[in-house]
């Protein structure tokens, strides 16, 4: 067993650096994951396990949305049902840290600690205070899998288990005004990460490999709320701090 211990506190850049170190040390590639067969194209949206695109508005951080999306997708995959909306407000109230505005770096550990995530219709309002005893949790998590930093080849296999959560750099204006196509911008950083997305699939178009990512800026942004982002160059740090939930 590996001991993964890294105290990630203080300002965001320190947290990110610390997390990169943690990923390098903690991400263990197992044989069963390496045995996964990949395809030319793959998209979890074709399996009914992805909920409609959200608009995060003023609520918390994008990672609050991504954590909820990851748990609802995993639950749908495990139970072979269509994904239902789980509570972003519960993630924000219970797992984000409103005092320090730190990014949540152990989102799935928190979901496990609070006993799972309730549906969006049963845990409604965002109060800033965790009220996990007011509803019945649906989506459960028992662990976190980490993508070794930069290993997009491994990520392509693991995504067949479940969609993947990733911190990315979304600070370039080219990112913010993206409308369609395969996004690539050499100014996009692989270490200054300020946003989060859910990676739902991959493919190749006209010889260019891409990841398909779900954003939380409404369905009017990008390709119906999604972006295809170049794959194979750790574009915008998509494989720098990527992880996924596990439920045994
Ligand atoms: C709510 O979360 C706390 C940890 O913050 C946990 O001890 C408790 O069991 C949870 N309650 C329910 C009903 O799951």
Image (cartoon, rainbow, N blue to C red):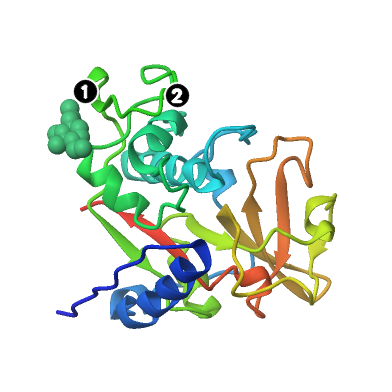
Q: Identify the residue under disc 2.
A: 126
Q: Could you tell me how far apart the alpha carbons at marks 2 and 1 are, in whole angstroms?
A: 14 Å
Residue appearing at x 35%, y 75% in the figure? 22
- The residue sitting at the left extreme is 1
- For the residue carrying disc 2, how many other residues have a C-alpha within 10 Å: few (<14), some (14-19), or many (20+)? some
69 vs 92, nearest the viewer: 92
Residue appearing at x 68%, y 73% in the figure? 189
Q: Could one spot residue 42 in this view of the protein?
A: no
Q: Identify the residue under disc 1.
A: 133
Up/down of 236 relative to 105, above or below:
below
Q: At numbered mark 1, what does the secondary structure look like: helix, strand or loop? A: helix
Tell me where residue 28 sits by quadrant: bottom left
Up/down of 207 relative to 87, above or below:
below
The N terminus - image quarter: bottom left
- For the residue carrying disc 1, how many other residues have a C-alpha within 10 Å: few (<14), some (14-19), or many (20+)? few
* Residue 182: percent from left, percent from top: 79, 63
- Asked whether mark 2 and ligand 1 are closer than 8 Å, the reply comes as no
């Amino acid at each position: 067993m590996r001991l993964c211990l890294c105290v990630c506190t203080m300002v965001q850049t320190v947290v990110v650096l610390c997390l990169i170190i943690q990923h390098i040390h903690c991400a263990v590639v197992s044989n069963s994951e390496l045995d996964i067969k990949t395809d030319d194209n793959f998209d979890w949206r074709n399996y009914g396990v992805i909920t409609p695109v959200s608009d995060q508005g003023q609520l918390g951080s994008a990672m609050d949305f991504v954590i909820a999306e990851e748990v609802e997708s995993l639950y749908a995959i495990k139970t072979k049902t269509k994904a239902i909306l789980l509570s972003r407000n519960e993630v924000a109230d219970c797992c984000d840290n409103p005092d320090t505005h730190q990014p949540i770096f152990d989102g799935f550990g928190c979901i496990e600690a609070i006993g799972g995530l309730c549906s969006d219709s049963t845990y409604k309002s965002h109060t800033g205070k965790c009220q996990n005893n007011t509803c019945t949790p649906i989506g459960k998590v028992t662990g976190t899998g980490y993508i070794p930093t930069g290993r997009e080849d491994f990520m392509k296999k693991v995504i067949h288990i479940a969609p993947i959560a990733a911190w990315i750099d979304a600070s370039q204006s080219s990112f913010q005004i993206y409308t369609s196509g395969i996004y690539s911008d050499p100014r996009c950083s692989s270490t200054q990460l300020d946003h989060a997305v859910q990676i739902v699939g991959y493919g190749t178009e006209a010889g260019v490999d891409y990841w398909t990512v779900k954003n939380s800026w409404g369905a009017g942004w990008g390709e119906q709320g999604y972006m295809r982002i170049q794959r194979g160059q750790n574009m915008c740090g998509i494989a720098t701090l990527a992880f996924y939930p596990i439920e045994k």
